Image (cartoon, grey):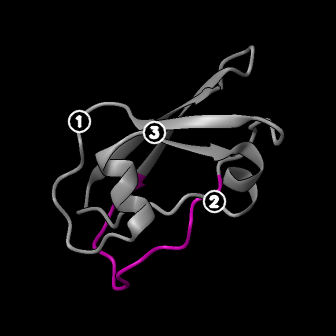
Amino acid sequence: MAPDGTEALFGIAQLTTLKRRQLPPVRLPGLDAGAIYRLALAGPKPPPVRFLTPGAQALVERTLTAPGAVLMEAGLQTPTLPPETVLLIHLQKV
């Protein structure tokens, strides 16, 4: 999180092969609950995966916006990644 709270970078790592097709949503702590954030991938797109929810597919394909309260409490549905893959997500307060 930037010191002024205007942006953040979150990393989501997949270390091993999963037995489940879908992980629970990842909560993003430390955001401003009353703010809206723009979310975009930082860095390369992840390798193609077979199991994407509509929300995870949207994150991979374009920029999204979401309230800070939702990202902190309900979380963000991320794609199921291949082992040893990291997904970097840049959030910017709008």
Q: Give SS at disc 2.
A: loop
| Quadrant of residue 83 within the rendered picture | bottom left
Question: How many marks are shown on the rendered structure?
Answer: 3
Which residue in the structure is indicated by mark 3?
89
The earlier-in-sequence mark between 3 and 1 is 1
Q: Which mark is residue 44?
A: 1
Which amino acid, by three-letter code, is at mark 1? Pro
Specify the amino acid type for callout 3.
Ile
Q: Specify whether residue 24 is painted magenta.
A: yes
Mark closest to the chain's N terminus, 1 or 2:
1
The reply to whether discs 3 and 1 touch (Cβ–Cβ < 8 Å) is no
- Residue 73, image x and y in percent? 75, 59
Residue 48: which quarter of the image?
Answer: bottom left
Q: Residue at x 31, y 67 (%)?
A: 16
Left/right of residue 73 with respect to residue 10 in the rendered view: right
Task: Say if 78 sits above or below 68 in the image.
Answer: below
Sequence-first disc among 2 and 3: 2
Quadrant (top left/top right/bottom left/bottom right) for the N terminus: top right
Dot 2 alpha-carbon crowd within 10 angstroms: few under 14, some 14 to 19, many 20 or more: some
Residue at (72% x, 44% y) in the render: 68
Span highlighted in magenta in the image: 13-27
Q: Secondary structure at mark 3?
A: strand
The image's mark for residue 75 is: 2
Indicate the secondary structure of the residue bearing disc 1: loop
Residue 6: x and y in percent read 68, 20
Say which residue appears at 27% left-offset and 51% top-offset.
85
Q: Is residue 62 or residue 76 the one in the foreground?
A: 62
In-image side of 41 versus 46 (left or right): right
| Magenta residue check for 50 | no
